[in-house]
Image: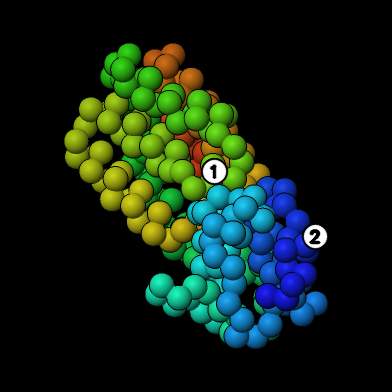
Amino acid sequence: MTENASGPEFAPIKNTRLSEVIIAQIASLVERGHIELNQRFPSERELQERWRVSRPVLREAFRVLEMRGVVESRQGGGRYLRSTHVIDPSRVRTSELAANRDVLLRIWEAREAVETKLAELAAQRATTDQLAAIERPLLAIALEPAEKLMSLDLNGEFHAAIARAASNPILEEFSERLLQTSKQVGFKSIVGLQDWRALQGEHQPIFEAIRQQDPASARQAMAAHFHNLRLRVLEASS
């Protein structure tokens, strides 16, 4: 880093797409010569303080850069700039989504078949404690700061709580396997924070139908959620 690297070039990160903003700032620093080829980046702690972001957000940005050969990480030796060609982060997200689209659509097709039935059964069988478990991640989404939301698995917690409330161990096991497969594809990492928060908001009607013991509405709300997931993927990758 040059001696100017601690100056205004390291402006606090405020955009909701935090990892992409970090990548864009690194690209700007490289272009202006504030970070040179083969130069070591400051420590994670120092970058967290300069950019005012969490460690998961910072690591996600560097993960993207490492995968594309822009940054090299050495065990115990920090991170180094290996290429001055820092790609546009929005193009990264689009290409990842396009590559994973068909897999995601098949997974969600299977999940919809299982989870609509789980929602229906949960509306019939959920206990007071199970309803509280379903609602807990919904309340957390409203309370957590924007940058932390993407690092939490509140989505998985919500769907798993419904599966438990259905009181059918066989369907619950199917649901857990599909949910884990969905996580491995990494849909959360290739959508923006605003889109992710909006999708989490679609959980509320599902919960309300289950709480009101309305199996038909619970099934319909869950189906609508998966329908909207498919639309987001198709629109984003088109």
Q: Where is residue 93 shown, x and y percent of the image?
A: 61, 64
Apparent side of residue 189 relative to residue 123 in the rendered image (left or right): right
Residue type at mark 1: give it.
Lys
Residue under numbered circle 1: 148
Q: What residue sits 42% from the left and 16% below the top?
A: 211
Q: Is residue 236 left or right of residue 184?
A: right
Q: Which residue is mark 2?
A: 8
Q: Nearer the viewer, mark 1 or mark 2?
A: 2
Regarding residue 207, the answer to whether it shows in the image is yes
Q: Quadrant of residue 130?
A: top left
Q: Residue at point 33% right, 41% down?
A: 114
Q: Where does the N terminus fall, quadrant-wise?
A: bottom right
Residue nearest the observer in this picture, 88 or 61: 61
In the rendered view, would you say 4 is above or below 182? below
Which of the two discs, 1 and 2, labels the residue nearer the N terminus?
2
Q: Residue at position x 46%, y 43% from top?
A: 152
